[in-house]
Image (tube, rainbow, N blue to C red):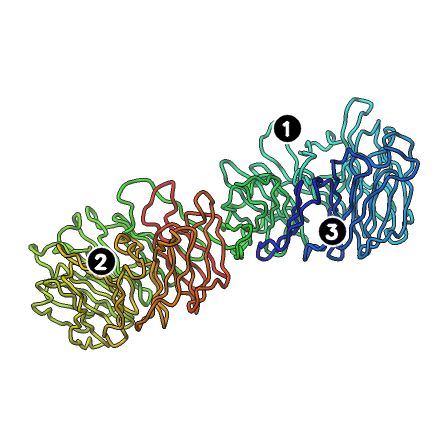
Amino acid sequence: MARASRKSVYGFSTKTGLPHWHWPIPGRGDLIALSSGVADGVGLILCGTAGPSQHGRVTATALDVRSGEVRWSRRLEAQAGQGRGALPEVPAAAVVPGRAVLLYGRRLEACDLRTGKPVWSRRIGGTAEPPARGRLAVSGGAVVHVSVDGGRATVSRIGAAEGTVAWESDLPFHGEVGGVRVLHEDPLVLLAEGTGRTGRGRALFAYDEESGEVVGRAALESLGDSVAYSGFGIGGDRPLTATGEVLVARTRVPGQAEDHLTAFGSLGGDVRWRWRSQGLITGLTRSAGTIAVVSRKSGAQVVVHLLNEADGCVAAAYELDAPQAGERGRVHLEGDRLIRVSYLGENDRDELQAFRLCENEAPSAVTVPEETPPQPKARVRGAFLLGLPHTLAESWSVTGRSGTDLDAVGSWCGAEVVVRGTKDVLHAFSTDTGEMVWWRPAPEGGVVVGMSGRAEDGIGLALMSDDDGTRLDRLTFRAIDVRTGDVRWSSTLGFGPRDVPHRGGPAGLITALPGRAVTLDGTRLTARDLRTGEVMWEHPLDAHDMASSAHTRLAADGSDVVRVAVHEGRVTARRFTGAEGTAGEPVDVAYAGRAAGVRVIHHAPLTLLVTGARPSRPEPVIVVFDARGGVANRVPVAAIHAQGLLADTGFGADSRVVATEDALILRTYSKRSGRMSLTAVPRYGGSPLWSRAFDADIGGVLSVDDCIVAIVPDRKGAPFTHLRVLDPLTGDTLGGRGVADREFGLKGRFHRDEDRVIRISAREDLRAKSIQMVRLR
C-alpha cells in the first residue's frame, strides 16, 4: 500500500503495517498526480519542480511498489512550436499491464512500463488555449481519455498496446460542460458538471466499456436522493461503487441527517435496494460480491457493515474502537482486513490503519433493507503504526462503572472466562467476545474481601464477609465455578473474634492448587477437595506459625503449597507436598538483618521479596527457591536497580515479574539511561543475563510459549501500546503487536488465555476500561 503526500511517498506492508520504503519528491518539487492503480508491481508518479502551473517542468517517475526503487524517470517536455501551452494545468497518468500512459499538453503518450521507452504517441485535438483539461481512467484493461474543450466533453477508449482508438463519443450532457470527474473506473462512471438549460447542473453517466454506449444517465436531482459528493481529496472522490449490474451510491434523503446507501439497477432506473446507516458514511468499497460501508454514528462510534451487493442484506457488523476510522479517507477491503488511508497527515493522525474483521457469529440476514441494521457483534481495534515492529492486534474492552469501592480485589482467568472482583460484585466476561457471562453480588450488607490468586480446574476461591470485612471470624470462602458463577461449596475459616486482622490482606489466607483448596485458619492448615469441599488433610500450626499468624501467608508453587512466615525478624518457608500434604522442614531464608515483612512476588518458582526492619533497615533482597524448597538464589534489590518493587504493592504487582526455566525476569530501572528496563536474573545464581531498556514504563510482562511479552505504552501523548515479543535468553525483539489504546499498557494485572492477553484494571470509573483483551495471533 502506497500513500502519497505533497512531498513524499511511503510504501507499507498491508500485512504488518511496517514502512517498507520512502521516496521523497526530488529537489523542491511537489507531487502533482499519481496513477490510480498499480500494474505489474509499478505505480506512476508525476511531480513538478515549481508546481503544476510552471509548464515544461513536470517529471514522470515509475516506482516499484514492493521496494520503492525507481524503475525509470523522464521529463515531460513541451513540444516544439507549442510554447507555454504545452502542458495542461494538471497532467494525468495511468498504468495498465505493460504500459504507462501519460497525458500532457495535447499529447497522449504510452511508454514501456519496465523501461520507460516511448511506444506510441497521439495528438489530442482542440484549439483552446490553454489546452483542454483531460482525465485518464483504466477500464477493462484499456485506457479511457476524457477531455473538455469549448464546453464539449469527449470520451475515448484507447488500446494501451498500440494506441488504437476503439471508440470515441461525445458526452451527452444537456448544456455546456465545465468539468468531468471519474467516479468509478471499472465499470466507467463519470460525473459531469456544467451549465444546462435550467441553470447549473450535475449528471452521472455510466458507460459500456466495449461499445462506448451510455447505458445509464441521470441528473442528480432526478434520482430522488441527492448523491452526497465532495470532489476533492482521497475518500471524497469515491462516493460510490459499481458492478456490471448495480451502482451503489452514498445518498442523502432531503430533511434527514443520516446517509443512505442506494443501489440502482441502472442510472435513472429502478432502485434495487436501500440501506440506512443511521449516521454519516465515511468509507465505501467492494470486493468479491461484498460491499464494506464505514459509518460514524453519534459520538465517536464507528461501525463497519458488510452488505451483500445483490440485495443489501447485512452479512456482518463490526465496531471499530478507533475514532479516527470514522474520519475522511479511502478504504480498501483485502481479504478479512479493512485498510483505511487517511486524508489528513498531522502528527496526531494515523496515516494508515488496518482492522482485521475477526470471525464471529454473523447477524441474521436483513430481509427488508429499510429495517434497522443489526447491532455490532464484535469490537475490533487495530492500527498500523509507523516504524514499529508489530502487526495489528484484535481486541475488545469493557468500560467501567460509576460509583465508589470499585477498585479490584482480585481476578481469575480460565475456561475462556475472565472474572474481575470488587467489594460489591464479581463480574465474569467471555475472553473471546467481551460479553458478560455472569455476575454474583457480595452477601447482603457485606463485601467481597479477596480472591485466590488463580483459578484451578475452572474453580476459584472468593473470600466474603457479611460485615465490612475487618473481622476474621466473619469470613467465609466460596468455591465458584468460573464458567457459570455457581457456588460449588462454601466453608468458614476457624478464626475467633479476637484474632487480629491479617497483615497484607486476607487474600494470603487462601490459595487454589490443582484439585485442592488450601486455607490458613486460626489454628490449622487445611486442604479440601476443590470440587466437593471434602477435607483431604489438616496440619496443626506450630507455635512459630501461631505466634506470627498476622505475618503468615500462603503461596502456590506448582502442585505444592508453601507457608511463608516472619517471626522475630526471621523469615521461614515450609513446603507441603503431594495430595497428602507431606510437611517439609521449615527453611530459614537467612536474611542478613532483622526482617520486617515479606511479599510473594512470583509463584512457580516461589520468589519472595524480603524487607528489613528499623532502625538498621537492611537492604531488601529477592529470594528465589528451587523445586525442592531450598533457596536457589539471593539477589540484592539495589544490585539490579529493582527498587520499584518496594513501592509496587498494589493490585497487579505480580504482573511485573515472570520466570522461565533459567531466569527470573523483572522490571528494573536503569539509572544510566533513566529508563525502565527488563532484567533477566539467573534462577541459580550468577550475574544478570541481560537487561533491555524501554522508552516508557512497563505495564506488565508475561511468559507466552517460549517467549517473553513485554507490555509497554508508547511515549507520553501517543495513544498506543506495544506488545514486544522478546527472546528470554538474550532480550532481543522477535516481533510483536500494536494496540491503538495507551490505556492497555498502564499498570494492572495481566492474564493469558490461549492466544489472548487480558488486562484487569486496578481502578474503575466511567473514563477507564476495567477489562481489556488483545489477541496475540
* Label total for image: 3
At label 3, the amino acid type is Gly
* Residue sitting at x 71%, y 45%: 26
Q: Tell me which numbered mark, 3 or 1, is placed earlier along the sequence.
A: 3
Residue beneath disc 1: 254
Task: Give the farthest residue toward the top.
Answer: 198
User: Quick one: SS at disc 3?
Assistant: strand
At label 2, the amino acid type is Ala
Separation of disc 2 and disc 3 at Cα? 63 Å
Q: Is residue 688 above or below residue 28?
A: below
Which of the 4 quarters of the picture holds residue 178?
top right
* Residue sitting at x 35%, y 69%: 663
Foreground mark, 3 or 1, reads 3
Which of the 4 quarters of the picture holds residue 260?
top right
Residue beneath disc 2: 507
As drawn, is 212 to the left or to the right of 14?
A: right
Q: Tell me which numbered mark, 2 or 1, is placed earlier along the sequence.
A: 1
As drawn, is 14 to the left or to the right of 80?
A: left
At label 1, the amino acid type is Pro
- Percent position of residue 775, x then y: 47, 58
- Percent position of residue 439, x then y: 32, 52
- Percent position of residue 582, x then y: 18, 77
Separation of disc 2 and disc 1 at Cα? 63 Å
Q: Is residue 488 visible?
A: yes
Q: Residues within 10 Å of mark 3 (few under 14, many from 20)?
A: many
The label shown at residue 43 is 3
As drawn, is 618 to the left or to the right of 7?
A: left
Task: Give the farthest residue toward the front.
Answer: 672
User: Quick one: SS at disc 2?
Assistant: helix
Q: Residues within 10 Å of mark 2 (few under 14, many from 20)?
A: many
Separation of disc 3 and disc 1 at Cα? 41 Å
